[in-house]
Image (cartoon, rainbow, N blue to C red):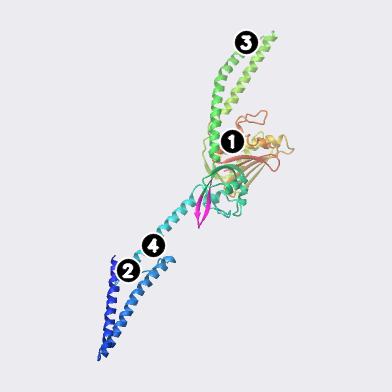
Amino acid sequence: MSLRRSFIFGLLWRMALLLLTAFGFVYSLDVEGLGAARLLAGLICLGAIVGVWRFVQQTNIELARFVDAVRFGDLSQSFSHRGQGSGFGEFGEALEQGIRRLREERHRLSDDNRFFEAVLDDAPTALLTVDGAGKVELANKAARKMLARHNGVRVEDFETYGKSFAGALTELGAGASRLVPLTLDAIPQSAMVSAATVHRLGGLVRVIAVQPIQSELNAVELAAQSDIVRVLTHEIMNSMTPVTSLAHTAADLMAQVDRGADPDVADARAAVETLARRADGVMGFVESYRQISRTPEVRRRQFEVLPWARELKSLFRASDAGRSVALALDLTPESLTLDVDPDLMCQVLLNLLKNGAEAASVHAAEPTVTLSFALTKGGRTQIEVGDNGAGVAESLQQEVFLPFFTTKASGTGVGLSLARQVVLAHRASISLDRSPEGGALFRIVI
């Protein structure tokens, strides 16, 4: 209101001066002998006209400059007019406050944008955007790290991670979610894919969140398996302990009464001793599974792979399975380091090498196993153990890691199940494929 009063007051006194000088000039025209006064009145009237015009024009110029500054985003302009009087000081201060408020708002929005950009870029969940034309962009670091094995921005370019995943990028609507298979570093995984819709530059863009949950599914599966094994072994051992004790007691008694004269007694003794041995075998079998119900304690540390791998090779060669089987070791690069529990991982790899050597020995004329370490494109470490044996049927490749499952006549089904437990305890993955030599290829990605 003060600005308005000042402006009106300045305009009124200028208009009053203009009217007064105009009246004086007109009056001087009708009176003889006032030539000098007529000239003076005319000059004053002209000055009043110029003053009113400049007063109004300067206001318009300042308003136009303010509007242009806002329109073109040039918030560095200044509108201070202190000392000019006639309301221009207040007028300029009002414009200055407005431009200052716009600067503060711009800085606040800029800070908010930087904050939200940092939150988006550092979010642990991989985020992608899909526009109306089907262009896919990786929106944050997690997405760029996870999905780094393709070139291009079309949905079809993402089929390298699985057709189901590429289909979800196209078909998933706002608010929907889907569990889809996702292949990362050649390892099949399960991922929860969710979608939302946001406005961007006048159009709609779908935001796709990709959250791999294979480790959580593995943890639930292992917990369920451990519970089942723990209950079964507990119940079996409770039932078999007295049977084993009685069988051994009976075998001892039969040994005392058997003098070799009665064939029926000899047969009964043989039957009881067989029963005792089988009871011991069942107890040993059950005892071997009790270790599966215990989660391995992982003591991770970082170390150089090369000397550790050479020691692993020496241990394999010293074993019964490794004496007649060649082992090829490959390390890329040789300076590679590994962050695992060296003892547990050594146990896993020795078991895989032993299985590969046994498979190759009964199938190939020159049995060979391979052990390789390499970096993936995503910066993870890939360990592969292969052989030139008969391999594992594709229908059985997902079952070999289950407890109690074995393809060997004398196997217990403990080794691979325990190996999977150790690998998953490292938050890593293990899978089975076919090696280039036709045998089995176990792949661990850490």
Secondary structure mostly seen in the magenta stretch: strand
Mark 3 vs 2: CB contact within 8 A? no
| Residue 205 forms part of the magenta stretch | yes
Label 1 close to label 3 by CB (< 8 Å): no
For residue 74, side relative to residue 233 (left or right)? left
Q: Which residue is mark 4?
A: 102
Label 2 sits on what residue type?
A: Phe
Q: Residues within 10 Å of mark 1 (few under 14, many from 20)?
A: many
Of discs 4 and 2, which sits in the foreground?
A: 2
Decide: marks 1, 4 in contact (CB < 8 A)?
no
Residue 364 position (above or below residue 258): below
Q: Could you tell me which residue is drawn at 50 percent across and 55 percent down?
A: 200
**Disc 1: which residue:** 419
Q: Earlier in the sequence, mark 2 or mark 1?
A: 2
Locate residue 428 relative to residue 98 in the image: left or right.
right
Q: Is residue 375 visible?
A: no
Label located before the other in sequence (3 or 4): 4
Q: Which residues are magenta?
A: 197-210
Residue 201 within the segment the image draws in magenta: yes
Instruction: State the SS at label 2.
Output: helix
| Residue 419, image x, y percentages | 59, 36
Question: Disc 2 marks which residue?
Answer: 91
